[in-house]
Amino acid sequence: DAEITQSPRHKITETGRQVTLACHQTWNHNNMFWYRQDLGHGLRLIHYSYGVQDTNKGEVSDGYSVSRSNTEDLPLTLESAASSQTSVYFCASSGGTSAQETQYFGPGTRLLVL
Amino acid sequence: RKEVEQDPGPFNVPEGATVAFNCTYSNSASQSFFWYRQDCRKEPKLLMSVYSSGNEDGRFTAQLNRASQYISLLIRDSKLSDSATYLCVVTSLMDSSYKLIFGSGTRLLVRP
């Protein structure tokens, strides 16, 4: 069955370190998204991609970067982790760009920055 | 003001009860509307889309009022397994493509 996976599922790191969170989908979806979820906030869009070599900034992109070298993967990098980036990170993918398109979410990565 | 607002709850109801959640959105140009369900420490999953004419899926009924810019979800005959957080989601056109805008969620606890 097609799926979307994230790794690691849990990560503890220190302030200032570079961290990369992996996202891999086997849906063959063109569109991939990274969100963060914090208490009191809905999921907020960090970066997204509509295809290989395409990346775009979302609502809360500062301090994060992504790259899309193939269809299946969209790794999220925190260049220099900050305590404010402690959060739960969800990757999602979708097959089209219509307003009705469903996004499928990965299981999430819980990141703690000390 | 948040673009999508929900009462965080929790709504604590007995099994078999009927419970309703509302959600308001600020962007009158929003195109599509959804309810997602999120279990504790899990990923969000699509529960149902919300259509202008209202739609039903088993015990779940969704309504959209574009004039007042609110969306509702009604759950009849609540089950213990309905305990979760329900996320109201709207799609808005931003930078030439549609983005999902999430509410913070309404937590439902169904007790025996």
Image (tube, rainbow, N blue to C red):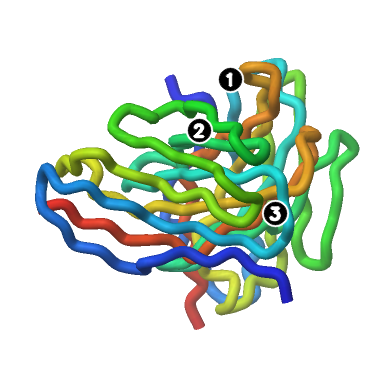
Q: Amino acid at mark 2?
A: Glu
User: Mark 2, residues whose alpha carbon is within 10 Å: few (<14), some, or many (≥20)?
Assistant: many
For the residues tagged 2 and 3, is the chain the same? yes
Mark pair 2, 1: CA separation: 9 Å
Q: Which of disc 1 and disc 2 is earlier in sequence?
A: 2
**Counting residues from the N terminus, which is met first, the one under dot 3 or under dot 1?**
1
Tell me the residue at 70%/58% (across/down).
Answer: B47
Q: CA distance from mark 3 to mark 1?
A: 21 Å
The residue to which callout 3 is attached is: B74
Pick whichever, B8 or B28, lies toward us: B28
Residue nearest the observer in this picture, A5 or B53? A5
Q: Earlier in the sequence, mark 2 or mark 3?
A: 2
Q: Position of residue A42 (x, y in %)?
A: 45, 41
Pointers 2 and 1 within a single chain? yes
Location of residue A1 by image quarter: bottom right
- Is residue B50 found left or right of A50 in the rendered image? right
